[in-house]
Amino acid sequence: MPYLLPYPSITLARPPGRARYAVSASIKARERWRRNERTWPSAFFVRFSCLQRSFRRVTAYSAILLAPILLAGCSSYYGQLATGQLELLRQRQPVAALVDDPGTAPALRERLANAQEARRFASERLALPDNGSYRQYADLGRPYVVWNLFATPEFSVEPLTRCFPIAGCVAYQGYYRQGAARGQAAVLRRQGFDTHVAGVEAYSTLGWFDDPLLNTMLRRNDEQLAGLIFHELAHQRLYVRDDTTFNESYASFVERQGLREWRRQQGLPEHGQPAREAYREVVELLLDSRERLRALYAQPHDEAVMRRLKQAEFDRLRTAYRLLRERPGQPPLPGFERWFQQPLNNATLLPFGLYDRWVAAFSRLFEQSQGDWQEFHQRVESLAAMPLEQRNGRLQELLDSDLQGEIP
């Protein structure tokens, strides 16, 4: 699954006074920065030998954006974020040059060419940003770009958040090395937290950098890769501070609806209704289990009883999934099959609450927009400008109207 920024502090460079949500104005500000871009020598980073290993020359633009985290030092959490991002930027190559290069492996050339068709579709048909993102390629030599760490208290389904100036709070912490993520997870477990480490194929820098296609993204087939591009560009189009659920639900809807339209343009049939319904049913199982746990943790049980009832709920969830999977005519669910093979805890449920909570509400909003993407994005921006409580209330109204088959 794609996740947003592994380090939200990258948006520290957003100009003062910027609105709480990033729209086209922030993209224009970014372009003004880049028109004034100059090259700084690596001596600028003489204090940071780890950066010299990663980057011989770095743009002034990149240096200014990363300065707040560079100052923390290379051995810190922020330092590994800076070195990881700079290494990624260093390895970018233009996709067009790779496609034209006879030395490029034929399979890679075909994948990159197909990805560029999806990239053009995203801007021309879905009204997503038309910039340099996903028009370059980087091979990182590893299966994931980052590993995200989710954590919750032992008796809570609320995430342990990490907060940053400007960007606000997010529900995970990103690491460029799997070992570092697992090490921090072990520290948190010793402190009594539930943890979950998930490999991430892509993330968004919200348009401040030209995010490249990555070898990690090519683990997906061409259709899934197109959806991932749509998802990450949606984050560049709109990002709301302190509201990960809104951001991910919006990007997930753009991904799913964009893929439906992409398949139609390619002359491919719609995915069958049984497959969509099966996915929805499993997600509902997971979200229902999350709410049952929330209600359990509000009860005045002692810790021993709470642990027993918590485990009983996860056992109930596994049984419910098995019954659904074994139902006659049930479509295969390979992704969920792998998910249920891992140890389950509060933290493993977090991504589903983030990515799926408001998807149906955005679907209803798209219907109200008569399928017009520009109007849809404008309506979403209006929602983003609301205070959190008012925004969630409006989304709940849209969700309720979807269940009732009515447009409010």
Image (cartoon, rainbow, N blue to C red):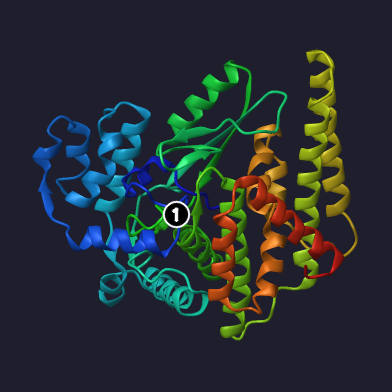
Judge from the rendering whether residue 68 lies leftward or rightward of residue 123; answer left or right: left
Which quadrant of the figure has residue 401?
A: bottom right
What is the crowding at mark 1: few (fewer than 14 residues within 10 Å), some, or many (at least 20)?
many
> Residue type at mark 1?
Thr
The location of residue 243, given as percent across then percent down, is: 57, 46
Left or right, 384 with reference to 207: right
Residue 269 against residue 310 in the figure, above or below: below
Dot 1: element: helix
Residues 301 and 1: in front is 301
The reply to whether residue 282 is in sight is yes
Query: Residue 48 or 300: which is nearer the viewer?
Result: 300
Q: Is residue 176 left or right of residue 335?
A: left
Vertical relation: 231 (above or below) 289: below
The residue positioned 63% from the left and 51% from the top of the image is 355
Q: Up-down: is 75 above or below 228?
A: above
Whole-percent x, y for residue 174 in the image: 46, 38
Residue at x 35%, y 43% (from the top left corner)? 12
Q: Can you say whether 188 is above or below 243 in the image?
A: above
- Total labels: the figure holds 1
Residue designated by label 1:
216
- Which residue corresponds to the image point at 52% horizontal and 20% vertical from the top-left? 187
Tell me, yes or no, if residue 7 can be seen here.
Answer: no
- Residue 35 in percent (x, y) is at 20, 63
Whole-percent x, y for residue 242 in the image: 53, 42
